[in-house]
Image: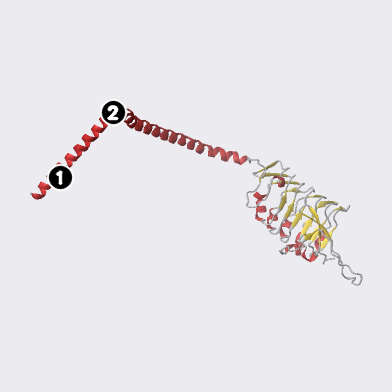
Amino acid sequence: MQQLKILSLRVNHFFGSVPVQLCCLSQIQVLDLSRNNLSGEMPTCLRNFTTLMEKSAFVGEIVRRRKISIQRFFEYIYDSYLLLSWKGQDYEFWEPENLLKSIDLSSNRLTGEVPKEVGYLVGLVSLNLSRNNFHGEIPSEIGNLSLLEFLDLSRNNLSGSIPSTLSNIDSLGVLDLSNNNLSGRIPLGRHLQTFDASSFEGNIDLCGEQLNKSCPGDETVQETQQPAMDGEEDDSILYGGLYMSLGLGFFAGFWGLLGSMLLWQPWRIAYIRVLNRMIDYILVMAELNFAKCHRWLKG
């Protein structure tokens, strides 16, 4: 059935490996094998899913309602009904021509590494590989999935660091990488900063602002910045002492001179006399100089 667009075998008791023959479904849009007992590795022939490699805007609507279109005299009319897990909740989905593009292999016993070929499925909107036994690193190619809105890789055995390319997915609304063996710093990105600790918890060696846990490199940075901080503190103490001494000197000089004159009458009289004499001397000298200049001009 190479024209098949929807394959939903969720919540059954299927076991064994995922058959590679599924890669012949080039038109597949929704592949849901979740909540089974499947084992083995995930197929690497994902590039055969040509429809999932095409970018298209998701215009479908997920609703929780019943739609009946079956009529007795129109046998060819039927309901296209799909129960789909979307962002952690089950929804009834109608109008399959507008289906979101999704792969859900969660809650199985799949092993091996997450194939990097998943990064070629640039039309994916939802990818759920949680609750399996995947190991190895998260492929950096996942950062190519620019339309991805939901990514759940939680409860596996994934190790290594979180690829910085995840910060390139601006449309990502739900991210869950919890309960793995991830390590290192959570990448600094304009979008990854919006997720809280629940998206990264359960990874003992993971650190970052979201987990309120400092990374080993942060201590070195703080040590190198410490001398500069100490120097700034020394300068602030020096300037503080200088400003305080200026204030005290102005206060003592101002009130020591004027305060004594205002409060003690003899000093006030003596100060006024000195001012008068100084003013008289200045006036006399000005008159003498004026007279000398006048005689010089006449001569």
Query: Which one is in front, 1 or 48?
Result: 1
Residue 248 picture quarter = top left
- Using the rendered image of the protein, determine whether residue 50 is visible from the camera's viewpoint: no
| Residue 146 in the image, given as x and y percentages of width and height | 68, 58
**Which residue is labeled 1 in the image?**
290
| Residue occupying the point 58% across, 39% down | 220
Element class at badge 2? helix
Query: Which one is in front, 172 or 49?
Result: 172
Specify the quadrant that holds the N terminus: bottom right
Q: Residues within 10 Å of mark 1 (few under 14, many from 20)?
A: few
Task: Decide: is 183 above or below 258.
Answer: below
Distance of label 2 from label 1 (alpha carbons): 35 Å
Residue type, label 2: Trp
Residue 257 picture quarter = top left
Q: Which mark is residue 267?
A: 2
Query: Which one is in front, 295 or 227?
Result: 295
Discs 2, 1 touching: Cβ within 8 Å: no
Q: Residues within 10 Å of mark 2 (few under 14, many from 20)?
A: some
| Residue 256 in the image, given as x and y percentages of width and height | 34, 29
Left or right: residue 209 compared with residue 287: right
Furthest residue toward right: 72
- Figure colour scheme: secondary structure
Residue type, label 1: Phe
| Residue 289 in the image, given as x and y percentages of width and height | 15, 43
Q: Which mark is residue 199?
A: none
